[in-house]
Image (cartoon, helix red, strand yellow):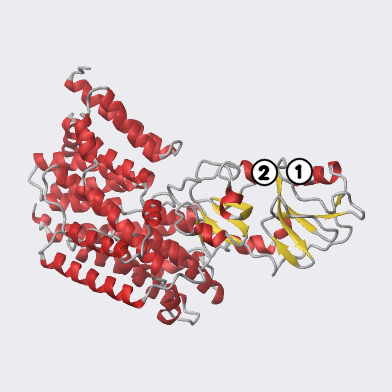
Amino acid sequence: MMIAEEMQMWIVLGVMALLVVGLVTDKFRPHNLFFGATLILMLLGILDYKVFLTSFANGSIATIFVLILITAGVNSNFNILKYLDKIFTQQQKPRWFLFQMMGMVSLISSVMNNTPIVAMMIPYVMRWSKKMKIPPAKLLIPLSFAAISGGMITVIGTSTNLVLNGFMESKGVEGFKIFDFVIPGILVTLAMIFFLITAGYNLLTARKNPIDFVKENLKEYLVEVSLSQNSAQIGKTVQEAGLRNLQRVYLVEIDRGGKLISPVAPEEVLESTDRLFFAGDTTGIVEIVKEKNGFEFPKTERFNLQGQLEIIETLIPYNSHLSGKTLREAGFREKYDAAVIAIHRNSERLRGKLGEIRLSHGDLLMLTAGRKFQKALENNTDLYSLGIKDQLGKTPRWKATTLGVIAVFMMSLVIAGFIPFFIGILTILITFLGLGLMSQKEVSKNLNLDLFIILGSAVALGSAFIETGGAKFIADEVIHVFSAYGNISLVIGIYLLTVILTAFITNAAAVSIVFPIAYEMNQALNIEASAIYLAIAFGASCCFTTPFGYQTNLMVYAPGGYKFIDFIKIGIPVTIIYSVVSLSYIFIHYQMYSS
């Protein structure tokens, strides 16, 4: 199909606009949107399928996945949580704790994927806050912000930097080296930490932890039903009594003489003294008592599960396969050996029949779990438990030592310039596998196909954006508006465009849109290439004003009981500080103040 060149440009611009709208509205999964956009352009003959295929062979994408696997290997073999009580203050000094915690998290995030780091730290931070009687909301936003800024200390600290590197290399531009971000990254991190432990601390909300509200108000979540005297249901299994697949409610737990049975298996036999606890729509529970012979509401107030019922908080992360499914469709009870008693979204409890609610990333699930629950979570990336793991399998000392020696040796060779960075980290990953510290199952669990599609498609879209002239068209308009004020204003313009896009769509999507524009600007003007691309990198990670701009923000959103306004209150001043420091470094380092 032959389409005029000018028409091709407008089609690409239209497809990019639809992609942004789709990402903002969150009606479709991101990988479907990216793949759909590239497929449309290929069908119209605008994007060559060979360009599409080679986009997935990008070295930076391979680097991202190797780093993800290494992070998963470290997380599953080495439990640093047991050392944290010795590292962090055990006194009621929240600002000092914040300084210690944010410093450590930002340092680790500079070399590891920050999502599992935050997932690991949330339980510890919540336990510390409970122990010290400090609202967790005072600590969880700083945890996320530290992970974000720490990721900017090195080029490998966040996948966004590597995606940008991939775009640069695809256009023949020399990519950033591993430590090119060190000085600006450390500066923005220190500035942000200083603000959050001083004036910013007072801007952090002090909202109550959602799980505490659930525990204190169990009667709002569970309804007790008992068996009447000489009930025909005594001796029947739960399945035979018709208590499976109920409308609007489900059986969560049985209290049998002080022994709690949860989740309740279909073959569990009912006994005369059993107290049955149901979750869901109250009217549905009333119907059970009315329609099913042998059930009744207790004649006296006996509800007292506090202290007995263990409620576990779990979080649905970004790109979870549970997102978009109901609990029933996901086979949640069978898969995780757990029963959900409440779902919180955007800090609000969702009402109605829990089994029919479509789950979404960021949802906080309160559940009671059986013996197989912890085993079900192993190598699972669809659900994060916010409880601290009791123990991990002990890694033999010789294996840990061997891995450490090889890792240090490889990274020394990388820093000295003897081998490429990718070869160094690939050797470390192979060492993990060779020592048996990672299984094939763990590797497959952590290879996110959705992310692979997004990254490869983003590179292909960026190429189409440049080749059809769409990027040049927008770049010319940006130059026309800002050029009268010098190169500094152009860099600020690109930075602000990236920040705005990042607030509403994924970081990779923001980079895929802004990079082609910046590339064409750099071709037309005498601007230091590294300066403008560094501005894109810092802009793409400037995600402090909304809970949805970055996945670690979304991870702390529900556990902290935050409202949207809480991120705006603290995020705006942090964004200003982050932007002023990062842009000032760029202007001074590249001597742009004289242009």
Quarter of the rendering containing residue 84: bottom left
Quarter of the rendering containing residue 97: bottom left
Residue 42: give x, y in percent of width and height. 26, 27
Mark 2 secondary-structure assignment: loop
Mark 1 secondary-structure assignment: helix
- To which residue does mark 1 refer? 284
Q: Amino acid at mark 2?
A: Lys
Q: Nearer the viewer, residue 244 or 51?
A: 244
**Quadrant in which the N terminus is drawn:** top left
Say the numbered circle drawn on residue 353.
2
State whether residue 53 is above or below residue 231: above
Pointer 2 with pointer 1, Cβ within 8 A: yes
Question: Crowding at label 1, few (<14), some or many (≥20) Cα neighbours within 10 Å?
Answer: some
Give the Cα separation between the discs numbered 2 and 1.
9 Å
Q: Nearer the viewer, residue 182 or 261?
A: 261
Q: Could you tell me which residue is drawn at 20 percent across and 57 percent down?
A: 422
